[in-house]
Amino acid sequence: MLALLFILFAAMAVGSALAMVAQRNPLYSAISLIGVFISLACLYVMLAAPFIAAVQVIVYAGAIMVLVVFVIMLLNVEQEERRRKRLKFLVPTAVVLAAILIAEVAFILATVQDFRGSPTEGDIAVGVTHSIGPALFTQYLLPFEITSILLLMAIVGAMTLARRGGLLPPNARVIPGAQQLPLSLVDPRAEPDDLRPVETNTTEEAARLLEK
Amino acid sequence: MDTAIDIALKFAAITVAFVVVLLIVAYTVLAERRVLGLIQGRLGPNRVGYGGMLQPFADLLKFILKEDIVPDKSTRFVYFLAPVIATMAALMTMIVYPFGPEIRIPFTSITIPLVIARFDVGLLYVLGVTSVGVYGIALAGWSSNNKYSLMGGLRSAAQMISYELALGLSLIGVIMLAGTLDLAQIVELQSGWHGFRWFIFFQPLGFIIYLTAAIAETNRVPFDLPEAETELVAGFHTEYSAMKFALFFLAEYINMLTVSMLATTLFLGGWNVPFADLLPGGRGTFLFGLVSAIGFLLKIVFFLFIYIWLRGTLPRFRFDQLMNFGWKILLPLALFSLFITATVIFFWPNI
């Protein structure tokens, strides 16, 4: 029974992964990747790690991939053309990486003899919420905190980089409804072809400016 | 052999649960139309069956018989997939809620728990599955090849990501009080004080934040911008007709039910009915189980009524107001509530 389920979920994971690489349409690739994450979550459940499975779905399938799909939808990325001129170094790199992977699998198959060692109580308790919480906040507190700060820095960094350059000055606030209007439209005293942009932060502000 | 019987029983239980959920949804739709009629000073549908009781089935028949129109330039596969994802994600959460205590079947010694699946991480399972549901709406918007649909899908994705944070943070207070993610255990913990030790009394702010964020997550008034009919025709499901539209409709109402069930389970004591343990026989009897299950149902009905009431009362947010409210008011409030809870638990761990 368990073996059947494993084969089912493993096949789903591998199939989705292959589909992700093979698809030309970026949105289909994204959907396939979601399929990979969900199949992996099912495998985690089978490995008696329900917490990791749930987090896998919430974080990867539920949050990160939503952003990816969001961006693909927003930019409306067209179906990628079949590129004739590939990056030259990719093929040898792929061959080397595949060789390393096969070598790893062969090594594991050769050295690990006992597949059927039954798990002990301690093994089973690893993936459960009650064992993850204490471990995260006692033994692994420092790595946990460092990771948190790293993520925070990444967020701040992303915002700083996104604000630098582009249309907005560094001190501009980014608010939904913000728009730029040409000066000639806002100010009647300006030259009729003066297209210098005027920032408005909200739709209300834009409407007020236009009324003047 | 025993496992085979177990699996068959689980399948049967899940089927029954789905049928019950669909019935509740059908009558929620009817109740919504009748109550809205009441609020707006008109009658609402009252002709099919006694007081309109057969209206949901008439609607269903209409949905099935209507022509199913597929837009010519839609992305076929995704267009068909989207309503399936939305409905499946909504239905899948229905199995983890404990709707009653363990009961002993009369005249036998068999005790059964009134919950279909009990997980160690039941709460996370609900959050995970519902967070997958957003793809249904986003993909529907994208695949319809219609700018209104796309806008609806984008709005929905942005809104759900924004409000998920406040929603998750408002639940952490309850998790800290309970010390577990197992929904059945969370309900058990609220059975003190003659079944009145509900977590809403310890987490009033968390409850309000949860309810607000959850209404936004389900795309209902006043947060129904993804389907704002004054701006976007019908939003993400503009191009959907007949049964595929019905599936989105179904998903929305099941999500409302999910929110009501989760709010009941986490904040209003789940199946705990005040002073039900003073009934003859005390806890564990069939009578106690029945009263508890009815109490659970009534609490859900209460939340569903709040949904309908809000729809009849409140106007819609504007999109920038919605984002400002989510990020600048709800999220800091949720953090504040979390901070207070953590401080109190730190100094008085036995509360």
Image (cartoon, helix red, strand yellow):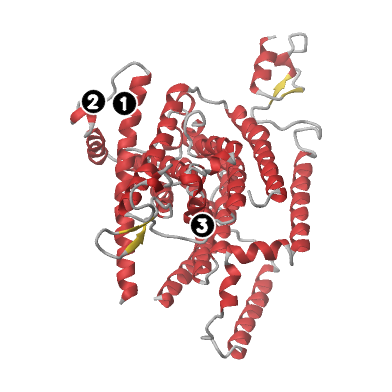
- Residue wearing tag 1: B34
Query: Closest to the observer: A139 or A186?
Result: A139
Which residue does the image show at 30% across and 55% down from the upper left? Answer: B15
Numbered disc 1: secondary structure: helix
Looking at numbered disc 3 in the image, what kind of residue is underneath it?
Asp
Residue B238 seen from this side:
no
Which residue does the image show at 72% across and 20% down from the upper left? Answer: A182
Horizontally, is B119 left or right of A102 in the view?
left
Q: Residues within 10 Å of mark 1 (few under 14, many from 20)?
A: many
Q: Chain of mark 2?
A: B
- Point out residue A212 in the picture as x, y percentages from the top left corner: 70, 9
Numbered disc 2: secondary structure: loop
Looking at numbered disc 1 in the image, what kind of residue is underneath it?
Arg
- Point out residue B51 in the picture as x, y percentages from the top left corner: 22, 27
- Point out residue A208 in the picture as x, y percentages from the top left corner: 67, 14
Query: Closest to the observer: B113 or B45?
Result: B113
Q: Earlier in the sequence, mark 1 or mark 2?
A: 1
- Residue wearing tag 2: B46
Q: Quadrant of residue B308?
A: top left
Label placed on residue B182? 3
Image vertical order of residue A174 relative to residue B5, above or below: above
